[in-house]
Image (tube, rainbow, N blue to C red):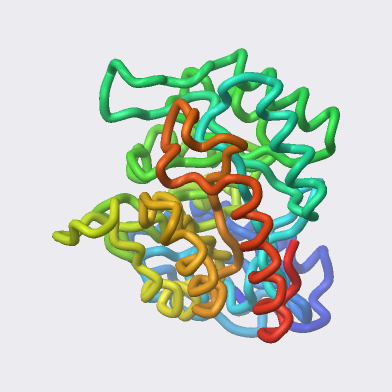
Amino acid sequence: MLVVMKNHATPEQIDQVLGAIRRLELTAHPLPGATRTAIGITGNVGAVDPRSLEVLPGVLELIRVTKPYKLASREMHAEDTTIRTPQTTIGPGTFTLIAGPCSVENEEMILRTADFLRGLGVNLMRAGAYKPRSSPYAFQGMGQEGLDILARAREKTGIGIVTELLDTDNADAVEAAADIIQIGTRNMQNFSLLKRVARARKPVLLKRGMAATLEEWLMAAEYVMAGENYEVVLCERGVRTFSDHSRNTLDLSVIPPVRALSHLPILVDPSHGTGKRDYVPAMALAALAAGADGLLIEIHPTPEKALSDGAQSLDFAAFASLVERLRRLAEVLGRTLN
């Protein structure tokens, strides 16, 4: 259910509606808009009797939300959401680049990458301190030492940090180090982890599960938003199909339905989506053309020496070339690269 307030509803009237919802033992989610405030209601297993709310001062109308993902739905929140970090914004009118190595390997490499990205005008760097790997013998990341390196990189260069949270045990440390907390494809339906980041005061980048439907993906976002963290960024990273020409099948066709059904920004990860660096530039440009709000790309100063995912990582020269091509296309499409 969505309570739509009148244009000039006072703060006192809004508070009165919030109190009435809570007395019904339901959860109220204020959703300020450009012209009026709406209040989403979650927690009800059956229909809400509208009569107790529609008679309150300042209430314009009550609208039933039919989608199972209430807070992530455009029915609840018609306007596109903008996510803000101290360094940049993700959302309408912009095309945000997040780039960096798959994992933190050492401080020199991270600082070198951060300086390179800042020189190109890129404000967010991705790098994993904790790495989920298919093999227990593969490099698992540097852990807390990696988080400390990322924190120092932000302090020295001003770049924002996007890093992955794997489990609730390390949640406090990752939240402290990150500007955006990444939930990877293997954890898209780790509901304990989703409930933990719902309590975080940082935006959450939610990757699509490798076999997840669109509805399952949006329901995972709903878990985060139901905990009153409304700053969720979706990320398409490819799904598993029968194709053998790439690591995954990058599903760019999901972008228009996401934009139709949800107000949340959507990024595309062409590195994991293809698994081959030669394919990354074409898919990155296609993602921009398809309406994505940005990219998550793996780069490395020496990909052939990377401890993880070197085959899909661009070197600095290739990434700089791609940024220039993206900038030209973004200008034609009326978007601003950031």
- Quadrant of the drawing holding the C terminus: bottom right
Q: Position of residue 261 (x, y in %)?
A: 44, 76
Above or below, 228 against 163 in this view is: below
Q: Position of residue 180 (x, y in %)?
A: 63, 42
- Which of these two is toward me, 94 or 5? 94
Say left or right for 47 vs 333. left
Above or below, 110 against 323 in this view is: above
Q: Position of residue 44 (x, y in %)?
A: 40, 58
Q: Which residue lies at the image location 40% right of the left edge and 20% below the top edge?
A: 139
- Which of these two is toward me, 201 or 268? 268
Say left or right for 9 vs 234. right
The quadrant in which residue 135 appears is top left
- Which of these two is toward me, 324 or 330? 324
* Residue 319 visible in the snapshot: yes
The quadrant in which residue 33 appears is bottom right
Count of marks, rendered view: 0
* Residue 52 visible in the snapshot: no
- Which of these two is toward me, 21 or 214? 214
Q: Residue furthest left?
A: 242
Above or below, 333 against 77 in this view is: below
Q: Which residue lies at the image location 44% right of the left edge and 52% below the top edge?
A: 277
Q: Which residue lies at the image location 84% right of the left edge and 35% below the top edge?
A: 157
Above or below, 335 against 155 in this view is: below
The quadrant in which residue 270 appears is bottom left
Q: Position of residue 246 (x, y in %)?
A: 28, 56
Q: Which residue lies at the image location 36% right of the left edge and 50% below the top edge?
A: 275
